[in-house]
């Protein structure tokens, strides 16, 4: 995610060469198919005498982003660390390091980075939205709702903030209130599997089992291995008396490689007892 408060332009300490200018364009690109070229272009800038610390900080942030896109998260964090060391005001480096730590499930560290993002750029919705999501994952629903509400003051149609606040409200026992956020998110992004999943979870929390089943089914049509949706549908089936179907779905959720089973059990398992 790109923060609008940052310029992608490099800061030159000397007149830039044509090679440097070409490298800037490639280093700042987001082409997922050109990761090696992006990294090589950032290397050109970092070797060039034509950039000051602020310019090198931006190049390091961009190279870190390419490493993160490549799945080389340790190298990404190392570049973000260096970028921040050269220029502590590089908002995007703080934010992107937070996103990488979020991806690695290092939520307290991610929250610290998003907090610095907010301090430096209080009107950047991404900082509030992502910190709110991290609070929600930690189960700190009051803090999550506060941050996500601020994000929605800044950007009322921010889909990520809507579906995360929906889930935080549901987890706090206010599922019916949260559903208004999920319904709005569905209007804005009807094909987004995270939106459909979040609505299913809120409907399950509200006890609206047929509608929850429909939402989980819709999620699974887009991603048949989505562990949260499989587990949620299993809970619905169990509560509707379909023990065999419930066992099948919950076993598939537990076998899926793309999930944190402990968190699924914690967030959705409690609804199994509500039969």
Image (spheres, rainbow, N blue to C red):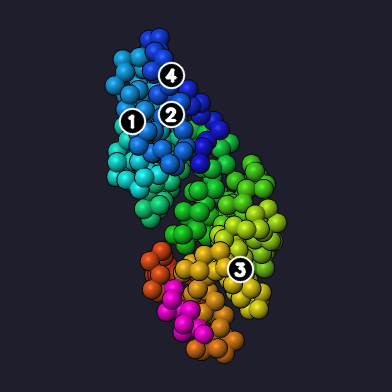
Q: First in sequence: mark 4 or mark 1?
A: 4
Decide: marks 3, 4 in contact (CB < 8 A)?
no
Q: Where residue 196 appears, x then y in whole percent?
A: 60, 63
Q: Secondary structure at mark 3?
A: helix
Q: Does any portion of residue 206 appear in the rendered image?
A: no
Mark closer to the observer (2, 3): 2
Decide: marks 4, 1 in contact (CB < 8 A)?
no
Q: Secondary structure at mark 1?
A: helix
Task: Give the residues in magenta.
Answer: 245-253
Query: Against 23, is 135 above or below?
Result: below
Per the model, the C-alpha gap separating discs 1 and 2 is 9 Å
Per the model, the C-alpha gap separating discs 2 and 4 is 9 Å
Q: Does any portion of residue 240 appear in the rendered image?
A: yes
Q: First in sequence: mark 1 or mark 3?
A: 1
Q: First in sequence: mark 1 or mark 2?
A: 2
Q: Residues within 10 Å of mark 3 (few under 14, many from 20)?
A: some
- The residue at 49%/74% (across/down) is 231
Query: Against 136, is 154 above or below?
Result: above
Question: Which residue matches tag 1?
Answer: 40
- The residue at 42%/79% (across/down) is 251
Position of 164 with respect to 56 (left or right) is: right
Q: Which mark is residue 218?
A: 3
Question: Which residue matches tag 2?
Answer: 26
- The residue at 67%/47% (across/down) is 156
Q: Secondary structure at mark 2?
A: helix
Decide: marks 1, 2 in contact (CB < 8 A)?
yes
Per the model, the C-alpha gap separating discs 2 and 3 is 38 Å
Per the model, the C-alpha gap separating discs 4 and 1 is 14 Å
User: Viewer-proximal residue, 270 or 72?
Assistant: 72
Query: Against 237, is 3 above or below?
Result: above
Question: Which residue matches tag 4?
Answer: 21
């Amino acid at each position: 995610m790109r923060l609008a408060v940052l310029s992608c332009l490099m800061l030159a300490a000397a007149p830039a060469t044509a090679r440097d200018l070409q490298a800037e364009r490639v280093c700042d690109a987001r082409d997922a198919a050109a990761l090696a070229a992006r990294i090589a272009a950032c290397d050109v800038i970092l070797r060039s005498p034509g950039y000051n610390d602020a310019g090198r900080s931006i190049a390091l942030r961009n190279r870190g982003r390419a490493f993160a896109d490549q799945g080389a998260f340790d190298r990404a964090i190392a570049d973000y660390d260096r970028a921040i060391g050269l220029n502590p005001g590089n908002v995007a480096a703080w934010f992107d390091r937070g996103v990488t730590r979020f991806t690695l499930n290092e939520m307290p560290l991610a929250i610290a980075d998003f907090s610095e993002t907010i301090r430096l750029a209080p009107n950047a919705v991404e900082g509030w939205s992502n910190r709110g999501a991290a609070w929600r994952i930690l189960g700190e629903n009051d803090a999550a709702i506060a941050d996500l509400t601020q994000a929605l003051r800044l950007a009322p149609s921010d889909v990520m903030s809507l579906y995360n606040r929906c889930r935080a409200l549901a987890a706090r026992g206010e599922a019916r209130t949260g559903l208004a956020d999920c319904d709005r998110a569905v209007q804005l992004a009807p094909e987004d599997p995270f939106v459909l999943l979040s609505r299913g979870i809120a409907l399950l929390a509200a006890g609206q089992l047929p509608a929850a089943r429909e939402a989980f089914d819709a999620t699974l049509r887009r991603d048949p291995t989505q562990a949260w949706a499989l587990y949620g549908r299993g809970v619905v089936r169990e509560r509707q008396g379909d023990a065999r179907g419930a066992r099948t779905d919950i076993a598939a959720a537990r076998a899926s490689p793309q999930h944190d089973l402990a968190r699924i059990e914690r967030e959705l398992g409690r609804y199994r007892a509500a039969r």
